[in-house]
Amino acid sequence: MMLMEVQATGAVADEVTGRTKIYDADWTFRIGKAVQFGGSMAIVLSRTRSAMGKEICQIWVSGEAHGRPLRWVDARMLK
């Protein structure tokens, strides 16, 4: 990937070199998997990793969700 710094006039000022790493990740839960979050059941909608490698899942909490049915949680909080 190549990024370029562009001035307001549209002229290219500098080429900004970027680094790209591709990591092979083993996911704890697949998308669509039913999981337990605290005392509630939930479904994994999506997942991502932080820059430090922490797995984060977006879940939909079924039942009593205390007004927050969609949440981003650390995968270690899920069973």
Image (cartoon, rainbow, N blue to C red):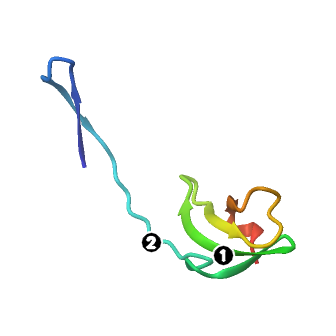
The residue under label 1 is which amino acid type?
Answer: Ile
Q: Residue at x 38, y 63 (%)?
A: 22
Dots 1, 2 in contact, CB < 8 A = no
Report the residue marked by disc 1: 43
Q: Position of residue 47 (x, y in %)?
A: 56, 66
Residue denoted by label 2: 24
- Judging depth in this view, the residue of 64 and 47 nearest the camera is 64
* Picture quarter with the C terminus: bottom right
Q: Residue at x 21, y 20 (%)?
A: 7
Asked whether 15 or 58 is in front, the reply is: 58
Q: Residue furthest left?
A: 11
**Vertical placement of 44 versus 11: above or below?**
below
Few, some or many residues within 10 Å of mark 2 (<14, 14–19, 20+): few
**Numbered disc 1: secondary structure:** strand
Q: Is residue 79 above or below residue 73?
A: below
Q: Residues within 10 Å of mark 1 (few under 14, many from 20)?
A: many
Residue 62 percent across, percent down from the top left: 75, 73
Q: Tell which circle, 1 or 2, labels the residue nearer the N-terminal end.
A: 2
Where is 37 relative to 22, above or below?
below
Residue name at image x 65 percent, y 67 percent: 59
Q: Position of residue 41 (x, y in %)?
A: 77, 77
Instruction: Name the front one of labels 1 and 2.
Output: 1
Q: Secondary structure at mark 2?
A: loop
- Judge left or right: residue 72 versus residue 20: right
Tell me which residue sits at (55%, 68%) in the image: 46
**Image x and y of residue 20, in percent:** 34, 53
- Three-letter code, disc 2: Asp
